[in-house]
Amino acid sequence: MRSTKYDEKIAIQASYIKYDSGELFVALKVDAVSNSEFSYMIGLPVFPYKENENIEYFIAENLEYSQRLFCLIGNLHKRNNGFLRLFVVGYEGYRMEISSIEKLMPGQDCRI
């Protein structure tokens, strides 16, 4: 139930945040979305992942540049991370299975 995803791919512009969690290492804060239906995500953490790829390594490798903005394209999970976790307080945000990730340069837009 927690792994149900939207069928539609969306683009999310997100910035790096430090997030302490025992389960997930990388969190990005959503700054903008390509579809206004997902505007409730702005300001929330998103946890990108891709099967058989180390997304954490890509993000950590690109933290040296000053902007720290990323463009994520993929399918967002429908339930937040706190769904059905009765004893984990403050574990908010959404997982996102990504098909692509890239760092954004100043003035560059995130689009599908």
Image: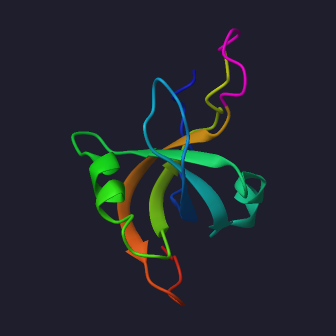
Image quarter of residue 58: bottom left
Residue beneath the point at 46% across and 76% down: 66
User: 99 above or below 64?
Assistant: above
Q: Nearer the viewer, residue 79 or 53?
A: 53
Q: Nearer the viewer, residue 63 or 30?
A: 63
Q: Position of residue 102 (x, y in %)?
A: 37, 69
What quarter of the picture does the N terminus occupy? top right
* Vertical arrangement, residue 29 with respect to residue 18, above or below: below
Where's residue 70, x and y in %?
47, 67
Give the percent coordinates (x, y) of residue 35: 67, 66
Q: Quadrant of residue 13?
A: bottom right
Q: Residue at x 71, y 52 (%)?
A: 41
Protein image colouring: rainbow
User: x, y (%) of residue 45?
Assistant: 62, 47
| Left-right relation of 61 to 92 | left
Name which residue lies at 39% across and 64% down. 63
Q: Residue at the location (54% across, 39% down)?
A: 5
Q: Nearer the viewer, residue 11 or 68?
A: 68
Residue sitting farthest toward the bottom: 107
Q: Is residue 20 left or right of residue 49?
A: right
From the viewer's side, name the closer residue of 19 and 10: 19
Q: Which residues are magenta?
A: 85-91
Where 82 sits versus 71, above or below? above
